[in-house]
Image: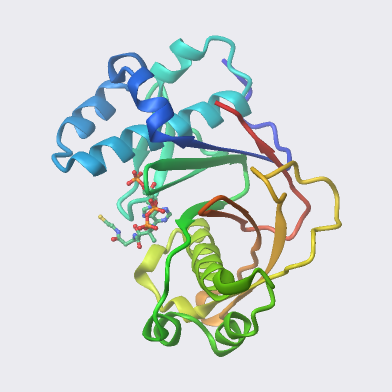
Amino acid sequence: MPDFNQKNRKILWTVIEEDKALSHLDPQHFLTKWERDYWSRLYVEKRSREWLLGRFAAKSVICSLLDFDTEKDCLERLCINRREDGSPVPLWDGDVLDNVCISISHRSGAAAAAASRGTGLGIDLESIEPRSNLFKEQFLTRREQELVSSNILDIGKESQSVMANLIWCAKESVLKALRLGLTVDTRKIECLPCTDLYTGPPLGNGPSLGWRSIEVNIDPRLGDRHARAWWTKWANRIACIAVLSKGNHQLLRLKL
Ligand SMILES: CC(C)(COP(=O)(O)OP(=O)(O)OC[C@H]1O[C@@H](n2cnc3c(N)ncnc32)[C@H](O)[C@@H]1OP(=O)(O)O)[C@@H](O)C(=O)NCCC(=O)NCCS
């Protein structure tokens, strides 16, 4: 039995593109019975494909995080179940892996997952798409809206869309780490992405730009909570990872 209680600050994450992965994935070989039953009830094809890809990504990062020897056997004994609030929860032979946190996101034909030991975390994946003024007013705080208008990213025409989607992505990652999802006013979580390269301890590499930090302010009405978050961008995608801790973390990418 692997030691599930060992703590460290490693966050393992991965992203899988559907067109590269789905043809190789045989659900019979990596889903548990509960997962096969759940998956068979997903009638919307897009949701069914995304769910499968998300489960594979989640299981892969957990297997790697816990140093499992036999990937196939472990993938079958490891079940990514869901809590009542929709958040994913890992089980090993039916027992909750209390000390292992997992988060999943899907967007436009890709799925991402992140896992850590002992640290609540959230991952979110977004495509860069136009966001209306109404969206900004309804979902972003005043300071976030100012950041969007500032064109601080200095990447031309796309600058405002990238920043708006980036802030949204960051909020969702924090809301997932808190296990609240979109059940609260998103302006209760303020995310201010730093545009300078992160200069702290090594975080590992994102797909292209590397990871940059995000200042996260959580409304005290949500309790005395603290989070750290990071963002990266490649092609038309943005990913954010948030953790409910003030300490330093190492972001490591699992390449599948
Ligand atoms: C969490 C949420 C913000 C993500 O929405 P999204 O950005 O459109 O979708 P993503 O693909 O990035 O994330 C979906 C994943 O978030 C996870 N998730 C769902 N609810 C979550 C929560 N409360 N906390 C943390 N993670 C959650 C799940 O793993 C889900 O994927 P899965 O269903 O395949 O396991 C949204 O689903 C939400 O607000 N959920 C809470 C309210 C709700 O409707 N709950 C359902 C109760 S049945």
Name the residue rendered at 63%, 23% in the picture. 3
Compared across the picture, whether 227 is left or right of 55 comes to right
> Residue 109, percent across and down?
37, 42
Front-lying residue, 208 or 118: 208
Query: Taking 19 as reference, is 125 above or below it?
Result: below
Tell me if I can see residue 56 in this picture. yes
> Residue 119, percent across and down?
62, 48
Compared across the picture, whether 248 is left or right of 19 comes to right
Name the residue rendered at 73%, 38% in the picture. 8
Tell me if I can see residue 101 in this picture. no
User: Which quadrant is home to the C terminus?
Assistant: top right
Front-lying residue, 63 or 6: 63
Front-lying residue, 162 or 6: 162
Name the residue rendered at 38%, 34% in the picture. 18
Query: Taking 185 as reference, is 80 above or below it?
Result: above
Front-lying residue, 255 or 249: 255
Compared across the picture, whether 156 is left or right of 53 comes to right
> Residue 100, percent across and down?
55, 38
Query: Taking 48 as reference, is 126 above or below it?
Result: below
> Residue 46, percent across and down?
24, 42
Name the residue rendered at 55%, 24% in the picture. 63
User: Which quadrant is home to the N terminus?
Assistant: top right
